[in-house]
Amino acid sequence: MSAITSRADAAAAGGAASMELAYGRETIARQSAALDRLAQRLDESFLAAVARIDACRGSVIVTGVGKAGLIGQKLAATLASLAIPAHFVHPVEAIHGDLGRIAEHDLAVVLSFSGESEEITRLIDPLIERAVPIVAITGRAESTLARAAAVTVCIGPLEEACPHNLAPTTSTTAMLALGDAVALTVARRRRFEPADFARNHPGGSLGVRLAKVEDLMRPLAECRLAPDTATVREVMVGVARAGRRSGAVMLTAADGTLSGVFTDSDLARLFETRRDDALDGPICAVMTRSPIHVAAGSPMPEALQLFASRKISELPVLDGKGRPLGMLDVTDILAWLPEASRRRLLEDRAATPATLRLIPPEEETKQAERKDRRSA
């Protein structure tokens, strides 16, 4: 093959790639423009749908078939994560027994762009018979579904991004965005706070970001605590605890406030430096005074930053008056963290300067997928 031919082939390939890139951008731009139009089209029907869901005393039953059904599953999951009881029921399974999952005081949110899918229209009468109100999300305001619904939020008319106007693309994007808008607006009405979100997301990086120090600390009953006037020997003999112990003793002044900590490493240094006489002296003479601590109610990322930057293994948790409530132990934290964030914490504790880097949820998922592929 000549050099001229090779250059021509490369130019042709580059031209095709450029056209595909432009087409991809156009596809996204068309869907973005459709979302802009949908945002402007929202009216009282949107508020009515929000009000119905907010007033629901049972569960929000989300249903849909095909691509709309997949969007419905995501909507049900979003509602549930926002503490709005919800679950997805497939319309085909519903008419084959799963109608039993729909109870009094429930509300049905039905997604169908055409509003005429057979699987959906067959579900209408059973819902009406059970006095379950229907909130329809559809592209056709005069469809069978829309006419049967108590509230209809119309997302249409829309043209699919597919060049043949066939594959559900723009319509499902609009449904997805509208579902998120409804769910978040209901949550806003209910004054949903990060603490509420944390109760439903105890795991993964979201759990790390939303947890409070009290969620992970060892309670005072499981910690070693002693007055700072006792001798080292008295403290080490008298503060034994059942189970795995923490590597530090919290020491308190006469008023109960934290005055210092004494660690297993501190004890080892006394032996290493042959200071045996210190064992029978007051522990306040050899303790670490005014130790690093964290206030109750602090977010866990703040505590993790202290573990990483100060290279400590124990972190006292204090109340508003400076009295110990418990202890954060690095071994407990490492067992609780997602794998990727745990690895980063260990790296950061070894680095200088150390700065904690929590793994975003999406990156954590990608790393787990890569690990699975390597193991396969």
Image (cartoon, helix red, strand yellow):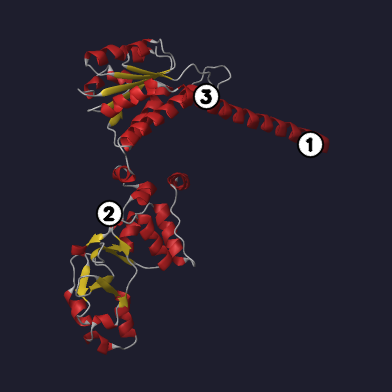
**Residue 154 percent coordinates (x, y):** 42, 18
Residue 15: x and y, percent?
72, 31
The local secondary structure at tag 3 comes to: helix
Query: Can residue 61 be seen here?
Result: no
Amino acid type indicated by mark 2:
Asp
Residue reaching furthest to the front: 44
Asked if disc 3 and disc 1 are in contact, CB closer than 8 Å, the reply is no
Q: On the image, numbered disc 2 is attached to which residue? A: 215
Q: Earlier in the sequence, mark 2 or mark 3?
A: 3
Q: Residue at x 21, y 16 (%)?
A: 130
In terms of depth relative to the viewer, which is nearer, 131 or 321?
A: 321
Q: CA distance from mark 2 to mark 1?
A: 63 Å
Q: Which residue is mark 3?
A: 34
Left or right: residue 161 versus residue 185 is right
If you read the primary sequence from the N terminus, does the residue marked by circle 3 or circle 1 appear first? 1
Mark 2 closeness class: few <14, some 14–19, many ≥20 residues within 10 Å: few
The amino acid sitting under disc 3 is Ala
Q: Is residue 32 above or below residue 292?
A: above
Q: CA distance from mark 2 to mark 3?
A: 44 Å
Query: Residue at left 33%, top 58%?
Result: 333
Badge 1: residue crowd in 10 Å (few <14, some 14–19, many ≥20): few
Q: Is residue 4 above or below residue 215?
A: above
Q: Which residue is mark 1?
A: 7
Mark 2 vs mark 1: give the one in front.
2
**Res 26 quadrant in image:** top right
Above or below residue 52? Residue 374 is below
Q: Is residue 107 visible?
A: yes
Q: Amino acid at mark 1?
A: Arg
Q: Is residue 94 rendered to the left or right of residue 242? A: right
